[in-house]
């Protein structure tokens, strides 16, 4: 789902626009092939259970992104100040699992946490 709204106002000859947007992503978890822990420990590297290829599913993926923009239109240029916050709820979405030979365990890695992106743009 994606939604956004812009408001425009004029003050002292400057045309300004304030924008707010929201994006929500929700999908089922990715499929993966299970790791054979005993075989991986014996060989020192990851060994998958190929006879069970893509038989397990990770938890569902969910993310909310939010953005704010202030745009100013002048006679010869336009400036835009924006902040986009990705994963605003700071949800830990599982990216996958891997075998760590140092700990000899199957570990989980997670996708990006809350990530603010600040930008300033000048258009001539």
Image (cartoon, rainbow, N blue to C red):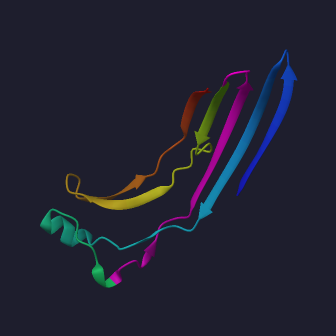
Toward the bottom, the furthest residue is: 51
Magenta span contains residue 102? no
Q: At 76% across and 46% down in the image, what residue appears?
A: 4
| Position above or below: 118 against 85 | above
Residue segment shown in magenta? 52-77
Q: Is residue 9 left or right of residue 63?
A: right
Q: Quadrant of the C terminus?
A: top right
Q: At 75% across and 36% down in the image, what residue appears?
A: 19
Q: Quadrant of the N terminus?
A: bottom right
Q: Position of residue 40 (x, y in %)?
A: 20, 67
Q: Is residue 97 left or right of residue 103?
A: right
Q: Position of residue 46 (x, y in %)?
A: 22, 66
Toward the left, the furthest residue is: 43
| Position above or below: 45 against 31 | above
Q: Nearer the viewer, residue 121 or 49?
A: 121
Quadrant assignment, res 122:
top right
Q: Nearer the viewer, residue 1 or 71?
A: 71
Q: Position of residue 7 (x, y in %)?
A: 83, 35
Q: Position of residue 48 (x, y in %)?
A: 27, 73
Magenta span contains residue 68? yes
Toward the front, the furthest residue is: 76
Quadrant assignment, res 31:
bottom left
Q: At 56% across and 68% down in the image, what residue appears?
A: 28
Q: Is residue 66 left or right of residue 106?
A: right
Quadrant assignment, res 83:
top right
């Amino acid at each position: 789902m994606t939604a956004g709204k812009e408001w425009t106002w004029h003050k002292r000859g400057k045309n300004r626009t304030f924008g707010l947007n929201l994006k929500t992503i929700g999908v089922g978890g990715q499929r993966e092939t299970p790791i054979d822990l005993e075989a991986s420990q014996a060989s020192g590297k990851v060994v998958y259970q190929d006879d069970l290829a893509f038989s397990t599913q990770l938890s569902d993926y969910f993310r909310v992104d939010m953005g704010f923009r202030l745009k100013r239109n002048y006679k010869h240029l336009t400036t835009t100040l924006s902040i986009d916050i990705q994963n605003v709820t700071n949800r830990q979405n599982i990216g996958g699992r891997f075998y760590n030979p140092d700990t000899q365990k199957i570990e989980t890695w997670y996708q990006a946490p809350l990530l603010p992106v600040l930008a300033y743009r000048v258009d001539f």
